[in-house]
Image (cartoon, rainbow, N blue to C red):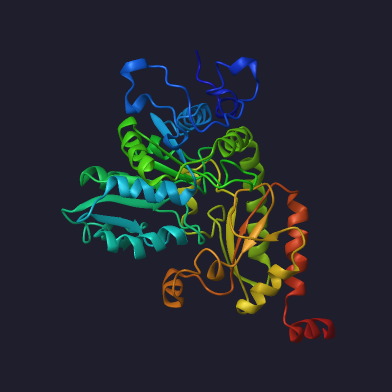
Amino acid sequence: MTKRQFSTRLIHDSEEPRIEGAVSLPIFQSATYRATSGDETTYDDIRYLRLSNSPNHQRLAQKLAGLCEAEAALVTGSGMAAISTTLLSLVKTGDHILAQDCLYGGTLSFLHEEAPGLGIDVDFVDAEDPDSWAEVCRPQTRLFYVETMSNPLLKVPDLPAVVDFCQQHSLTSLIDNTFASPALFQPLSMGFDVELHSATKYLNGHSDIVAGCVASTREHISTITHRLNHLGGILDPHACFLLHRGLKTLELRMTQQCHNAQMLAERLQEHPDVSQVHYPGLSSHPAHQRASEWFGGCGGVLSFSVVGDGARAQRLLNQLTLAVDAPSLGGVETLVSRPAVSSHAGQSAQQRQTLGISDQLIRVAVGIEAAQDLWDDFEQALDASAPQSEVVAMEDS
């Protein structure tokens, strides 16, 4: 039988057999299950919610594994639970990690603040410069951690080079694929070992749960599951149900979000009050060629810097009527934020400056609204947020 297309698999994978004929998988709101193995019961036979083995967990993990082209998958209580549990499963005291220098703020904070206390060393590298990696690789190096597209500047690492480097040096390659989702990019098919997601974002798509996902080989998932059982960062059955449901519209949502982001990036780039736009779909983006070659679209996140300062950027956010000033991304509604006071507020001003995150930088996570309505909203907010002296000058001219 010919392999079904991705959009069909989103809806039908892991749905059979349908429980009591239910078209939608029911919510199994039970913390524990009756033992069925008699005197031969082992730990692995126990059905208990903390072990992430309810029917909701199992069906969801099967669907995610198939969509990521993985042998197995695991869902967690948040994206950070997926990231931290995976890292703690694959490294130990005395080990060393290579990590992309521009990562999600929560991941950066974990690597900067938690890893050293556990005796784990981290070197941050330019993931677009493969020639620099060997200099910091050590005999104790165990893994290389990158993101498909970085937050919030949308940098795209040299992903095939990361895979090759890890294979040459016997390292485990980890990639946070949240910004692309399996609808746009399949990192395991490229050769990455472990794929991570904040399922809060595009996988769920409706801004109503917090969840995480890990996809990899059965061996890796078994190791990570064992650690998760101890740390307890599980997902509850109702959130599993919502994530399972949200996945079914992933491709439809991503198609519209990519369209909206491309249009918004192109128009912002032309606006006189915008000094820079970061979006791989723009030909001006340094990684445009790589993104066009590897991805099925450049995603729904872009960032731009306004002419002025942080106060001007905040005025712009305050003037928006459709876009909501809130953290997170991937939902059906457009969200905006200033990374300097949200996702990267945990970094010092010097760290943010080094990363290129200015006070006037605005991140936009587009939703599925009509593209023209979005642009009208941003255009009026740009005009309304201009300093009064500029407004008077425009009126006089």
Residue 264 visible = yes
Which of 83/368 is in front? 83
Percent of width and height locating residue 309: 61, 79
Left or right relative to 283: residue 273: right
Q: Residue at image x 62%, y 43%?
A: 205
Rendered residue at 24%/51% (across/down):
92
Q: Quadrant of residue 335?
A: bottom right
Residue 181 is situated, as x and y percent measured from the top left of the image, at 52, 42
Q: Quadrant of the C terminus?
A: bottom right
Q: Residue at x 52, y 61 (%)?
A: 152
Tell me where residue 123 sits by quadrant: bottom left
In which quadrant of the rendered view does residue 323 lie? bottom right
Can residue 159 be seen here? Answer: no
Where is residue 328 shown, x and y percent of the image? 58, 55
Number of numbered discs present? 0
Using the image as rendered, state which of residue 121 and residue 311 is in the foreground: 121
Q: Is residue 16 above or below residue 321?
A: above
Examine the rendered structure and indicate whether residue 326 appears above or below residue 218: below
